[in-house]
Amino acid sequence: MKKVFHLSTCDTCKRILGKLSLPEDVIIQDIKKEHISESDLEFLYKNTRSYEILLNKRAKKYTEAGLKDENLSEEEIKEYILSHYTFLKRPIFVIDDKIFIGNDKHTVDALKSLFND
Protein backbone atom coordinates (compact mmCIF):
# COMPACT_ATOMS: atom_id res chain seq x y z
CA MET A 1 0.00 0.00 0.00
CA LYS A 2 1.16 3.50 -0.84
CA LYS A 3 -1.24 5.96 0.69
CA VAL A 4 -1.42 9.23 2.58
CA PHE A 5 -4.29 9.98 4.94
CA HIS A 6 -4.53 13.74 5.41
CA LEU A 7 -6.93 16.63 5.84
CA SER A 8 -6.88 19.07 2.93
CA THR A 9 -7.88 21.98 5.18
CA CYS A 10 -5.03 21.31 7.64
CA ASP A 11 -2.16 23.75 7.17
CA THR A 12 0.31 21.31 8.73
CA CYS A 13 -0.69 18.54 6.33
CA LYS A 14 -0.39 20.95 3.39
CA ARG A 15 3.04 22.11 4.57
CA ILE A 16 4.33 18.53 4.92
CA LEU A 17 2.91 17.37 1.59
CA GLY A 18 4.40 20.48 -0.05
CA LYS A 19 7.89 19.50 1.13
CA LEU A 20 7.74 16.02 -0.40
CA SER A 21 8.22 14.73 -3.93
CA LEU A 22 5.73 11.88 -3.81
CA PRO A 23 5.69 9.31 -6.60
CA GLU A 24 2.60 9.24 -8.80
CA ASP A 25 1.50 5.87 -7.44
CA VAL A 26 0.89 7.23 -3.94
CA ILE A 27 -2.83 7.65 -3.22
CA ILE A 28 -3.60 10.85 -1.34
CA GLN A 29 -6.85 10.50 0.61
CA ASP A 30 -8.56 13.51 2.19
CA ILE A 31 -10.16 11.96 5.27
CA LYS A 32 -12.85 14.62 5.42
CA LYS A 33 -14.10 13.81 1.92
CA GLU A 34 -13.43 10.08 2.10
CA HIS A 35 -13.39 8.81 5.66
CA ILE A 36 -10.90 6.11 6.54
CA SER A 37 -12.38 2.67 5.92
CA GLU A 38 -12.51 0.05 8.60
CA SER A 39 -10.21 -2.16 6.52
CA ASP A 40 -7.62 0.64 6.18
CA LEU A 41 -7.84 1.34 9.90
CA GLU A 42 -7.38 -2.36 10.67
CA PHE A 43 -4.36 -2.42 8.36
CA LEU A 44 -2.85 0.46 10.33
CA TYR A 45 -3.63 -1.31 13.59
CA LYS A 46 -2.08 -4.54 12.38
CA ASN A 47 1.13 -2.67 11.62
CA THR A 48 1.21 -0.44 14.72
CA ARG A 49 -0.52 -2.75 17.23
CA SER A 50 -2.29 0.29 18.69
CA TYR A 51 -5.32 2.42 17.90
CA GLU A 52 -4.15 4.88 20.54
CA ILE A 53 -1.13 5.79 18.40
CA LEU A 54 -3.59 6.69 15.64
CA LEU A 55 -5.80 8.85 17.87
CA ASN A 56 -5.64 12.62 17.48
CA LYS A 57 -5.67 13.82 21.08
CA ARG A 58 -5.59 17.44 19.91
CA ALA A 59 -8.94 17.17 18.13
CA LYS A 60 -11.60 19.58 19.34
CA LYS A 61 -14.10 16.72 19.55
CA TYR A 62 -11.67 14.76 21.73
CA THR A 63 -11.45 17.65 24.18
CA GLU A 64 -15.16 18.48 24.06
CA ALA A 65 -16.09 14.87 24.82
CA GLY A 66 -13.80 14.85 27.86
CA LEU A 67 -11.93 11.83 26.53
CA LYS A 68 -8.66 12.99 28.07
CA ASP A 69 -9.93 11.81 31.45
CA GLU A 70 -11.28 8.52 30.12
CA ASN A 71 -9.44 5.22 30.08
CA LEU A 72 -10.49 4.18 26.58
CA SER A 73 -10.08 0.63 25.35
CA GLU A 74 -8.52 -0.02 21.96
CA GLU A 75 -11.97 -0.98 20.63
CA GLU A 76 -13.49 2.29 21.88
CA ILE A 77 -10.69 4.27 20.26
CA LYS A 78 -11.28 2.41 17.01
CA GLU A 79 -14.98 3.34 17.13
CA TYR A 80 -14.17 7.01 17.75
CA ILE A 81 -11.77 7.09 14.81
CA LEU A 82 -14.36 5.48 12.55
CA SER A 83 -17.11 7.81 13.81
CA HIS A 84 -15.46 11.10 12.80
CA TYR A 85 -12.42 12.02 10.72
CA THR A 86 -11.00 14.44 13.30
CA PHE A 87 -10.19 11.58 15.66
CA LEU A 88 -7.56 10.23 13.23
CA LYS A 89 -4.08 11.64 13.78
CA ARG A 90 -2.70 13.14 10.62
CA PRO A 91 -1.02 12.95 8.32
CA ILE A 92 -0.42 9.23 8.09
CA PHE A 93 1.84 7.93 5.34
CA VAL A 94 1.78 4.25 4.46
CA ILE A 95 4.59 3.30 2.12
CA ASP A 96 4.79 -0.45 1.64
CA ASP A 97 5.78 -1.81 5.06
CA LYS A 98 6.55 1.58 6.63
CA ILE A 99 4.07 3.79 8.46
CA PHE A 100 4.73 7.41 9.39
CA ILE A 101 2.24 8.98 11.81
CA GLY A 102 1.87 12.62 12.72
CA ASN A 103 3.89 15.72 12.16
CA ASP A 104 6.78 15.68 14.61
CA LYS A 105 10.20 16.70 13.29
CA HIS A 106 11.60 13.15 13.34
CA THR A 107 8.68 11.87 11.22
CA VAL A 108 8.89 14.72 8.72
CA ASP A 109 12.67 14.32 8.40
CA ALA A 110 12.26 10.58 7.77
CA LEU A 111 9.68 11.33 5.06
CA LYS A 112 11.96 13.91 3.44
CA SER A 113 14.84 11.43 3.32
CA LEU A 114 12.55 8.77 1.84
CA PHE A 115 11.01 10.95 -0.88
CA ASN A 116 13.48 13.72 -1.59
CA ASP A 117 16.80 11.87 -1.91
Image (cartoon, rainbow, N blue to C red):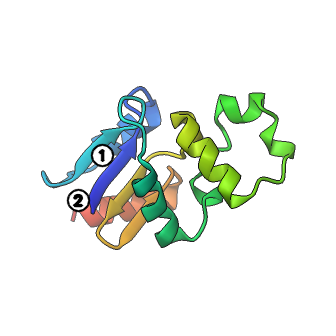
Farthest right residue in view: 69
Residue at image mark 2: 116
- Is 115 on the left-hand or right-hand side of 74? left
The C terminus lies in quadrant? bottom left
Local SS, label 2? loop
Residue 96 image position (x, y, % from top left): 29, 69
Q: Taking 113 as reference, is 30 above or below it?
A: above
Farthest left residue in view: 24
- Is 86 on the left-hand or right-hand side of 34? right
Residue 26 image position (x, y, % from top left): 21, 53
Alpha-carbon neighbours of circle 2 within 10 Å: few (<14), some, or many (≥20)?
Answer: few
What residue is at 27 percent from the left and 50 percent from the top?
20
- Residue 63, quarter of picture: top right
For marks 1 and 2, give the CA distance: 8 Å
- Tell how many labels: 2
Residue at image mark 1: 19
What residue is at 12 percent from the left and 51 percent from the top?
24
Considering depth in this image, is 80 or 55 the residue closer to the camera? 80
Kindly indicate whether the residue at mark 2 contacts the one at mark 1 (C-beta within 8 angstroms). Answer: yes
What residue is at 77 percent from the left and 53 percent from the top?
72
Residue 84 image position (x, y, % from top left): 55, 34
Label 2 is placed on what type of residue? Asn
